[in-house]
Amino acid sequence: MMATVRDQLTAPESGWKRYDDAEPFISYTGFTQRNTTVTGAYQGKSSYNANGSTIGEVLFSFVGTKVRIISSSTNQYRAESVSISIDGEMEMFTARTTENQVQTLVYERKNLPYGRHTVRIFDFKGITNAGAAAFGLDAIDIDSDGYLTRTIGSQLTAHDSGWKRYDDNISSIKYVGNFTNGVGAGAYNGYSNYTSTIGDKIVFDFEGTKLRLIGARYTNRSDLIEVYVDGIVHGTHSQLGSELAQVLQVEIVGLTQARHRVEIVNRASESATNAKTTFMALDAIDIDSDGRLFHPDEVTSIVGIEIGKRIRCHYQASTSGTVGTFSGLGKENSSFIPTSGSISTPNGDFYFIVVENWNGDLKLIADRNVQNLISWDALNKDGMVYGIDTIFERELSPTELLGIPFASTSLNASRTPDKAFDGIVSSSSVYWYSDAVASVQWIGYDFGAGNEKVISRIGLSGFSHTYNYSPKNFIIQGSNDNISWIDLRSVIDSGISAGVISAFDFNNENAFRYYRIYITEAYRTATIGVVNTGLAEFKFWESDPIITTKSSSIRLLTGGISTTDKDNEWDKYIVNSTLDGTIIAGDNNVWNWNVPTYSWVSSTGPNSGSRAARGYNSNSTWAQSTQGTAGTTNMGFRPMILLPNMLMIKHFLKINGEYKIYELGSSTWNTISATLPSEDTFINEGMDDLSVLDRKNEVFVQTMTANGSLGSGKLFKGSIDLKKYFEITNVSVK
């Protein structure tokens, strides 16, 4: 038998679940006693108001279809009528009974539409008699699969569990209109983006199922802001009211797990004739903890990429004035490199923006300087001025290493090879250490069958000790059977020491199951031949299988310092290009040139030994500096990448030992075969239409049509479309 109102209900019934009155998502106003000990109450405590002059209020929101209010105690002193509203629809209930009773069901509402509902219990005063209260809240019961959530309008200074937060200044957010990033009292990270122009909007994409918008409430804010998700209005909200920072102003849940487009538009009602009431601000965005924020023009693959689109990339330089490494193309690897300021040792993401697509050959330019305080000479030394073949890599985290470490020997059970793959770079207690029984030693990793990887870099760190036992001379090797090993690089005098990762790059286009270093000498060894050696950490970097199918090149833009410079990429793309109408030419919001740092270009300056630089305070500004200068004039590195036509729409690629095809519809790589595909497989899967290869005779029958008279004869005309027929001179099948 189901419980009814005024019954004692000491536990939630089947189909319900209970939240205590101390749940942080429940807000109280005018309550003098919060979570106070009450005999017989749920979990021994309840919340109530014992002040007869103060009107109490309870406010909470939940996602579900039903709700029950459990009172801590009911008796003759409790309120005869208490107001309750659900989504603005008001009702009354009583908190009074003739006998004392704890954990009493005083209100119930069922059959609400599934979704978010806001509940307000109000208009009751405490009784100044013996600490009694007009109403006391003990617990809330809702659907067993529902949950309490934040109340719209409440302050939320940090994301809740199951969510993650993005600041308003992240490069993934597109601001359309006259926005300013300014100091905000109490704002998340101290700043927020705002506009006072009606019609301005904020646009971004996110991958996930839920969304929260964090803003600020103030007396000069817009009272009408529309929020669209995938082109559909998901309601309006107002930022007008008493001052409060980091306010939860919008929450949308229950979306499909997919990428969604969000637009926030400043409308401001027609009654807002005073310009000061039209300000709209964004402070932060909360989404699923495993979700991701995207710029509206962002893509995750170079396949089919168009002019104006952008793709995310990671750049890290551990030493100031030295060129770093690029990795993680298309992935969210970390936070963004700041668009302003001197970042001499960056470790963050940025965007490459497509500026040209010539028959599939791509040119992409970084949307910012990725590293400052670096000289032209330093860039030239590493081939970055005029172009160098580049492999895109990403570091494998310890959580991705699901295989088995191995080593030639281990000193004891606490010095096994797994200690070198735990993510701890500097350690004096957790490390791999060999014994002294072998003249050579090795340590490596088995990624497992079917999980072969194209590794192009390893990183090694020694352990802290009085003596350096790190590997000195070794060979990096790969294998697929743990018997036959392929030498990938020989290292002499490695320089490995404790507490820092020493990286070793090597050319490798093959996917191996096993990787190891074959150690022939350690630094502690007095003569040739290993006695004891060890490592605190062993890291791997994986090559991007798409990028490495053909050579890519990274270099500086050509800059141009006068109208006589014909080969001038800076002016062509940064200053003058609208990228096929996708941006405003020279837009600083896209190219971030308006920072106190120039961008080096490859052009020579007018003065002897000088090199040109562009940007700083105008997209057309140029300067010159000696090529060895870095810090004094604040010069920066803005890379440009050239990607040759790597992918045809119909093809096979061999990736990690499997033949794959790219499906445009699902934007995924699908495995066709683990072995060389047969002719039938290629015909059925590799190309949609092979009719053009059918060279049978074609008979054309053209119907003749009278087209007027010329004397005693007739004129006939017609046309044949020969564009779909072409001459094949050679076919190669491998």
Image (cartoon, rainbow, N blue to C red):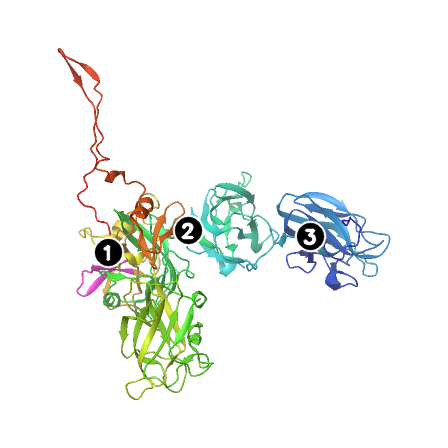
Question: Would residue 179 appear left or right of 484 to someone viewing this image?
Answer: right
Q: Which residue is mark 3?
A: 16
Residue 391: image x %, image y %?
30, 62
Residue 140 sits in quarter: bottom right
Q: Position of residue 160 (x, y in %)?
A: 57, 59
Q: Secondary structure at mark 2?
A: loop
Question: Which residues are drawn in magenta?
Answer: 599-615
In the image, residue 252 lies in the stretch drawn in magenta: no
Q: Position of residue 234 (x, y in %)?
A: 54, 43
SS for tag 3?
A: strand
Find out whether residue 607 is within the magenta segment. yes
> What residue is pinned by disc 1?
559
Residue 100 occupies quadrant: bottom right
Q: What is the number of the mark on residue 633?
A: none
Answer few, some or many: residues within 10 Å of disc 1's Cα (few below 14, many 20 plus, some between 14 and 19): many
Which callout, 2 or 3, points to the residue nearer the camera? 3
Query: Mark 2 vs mark 3: which is more N-terminal?
Result: 3
For the stretch drawn in magenta, the main secondary structure is strand
Label 2, label 1: how far apart the Cα atoms are? 28 Å
Observer-nearest of 263 and 288? 288
Residue reaching furthest to the right: 98
Q: Amino acid at mark 3?
A: Trp
| Type of the residue with mark 2 | His
Amino acid carrying mark 1 in the image: Gly
Secondary element at tag 1: loop
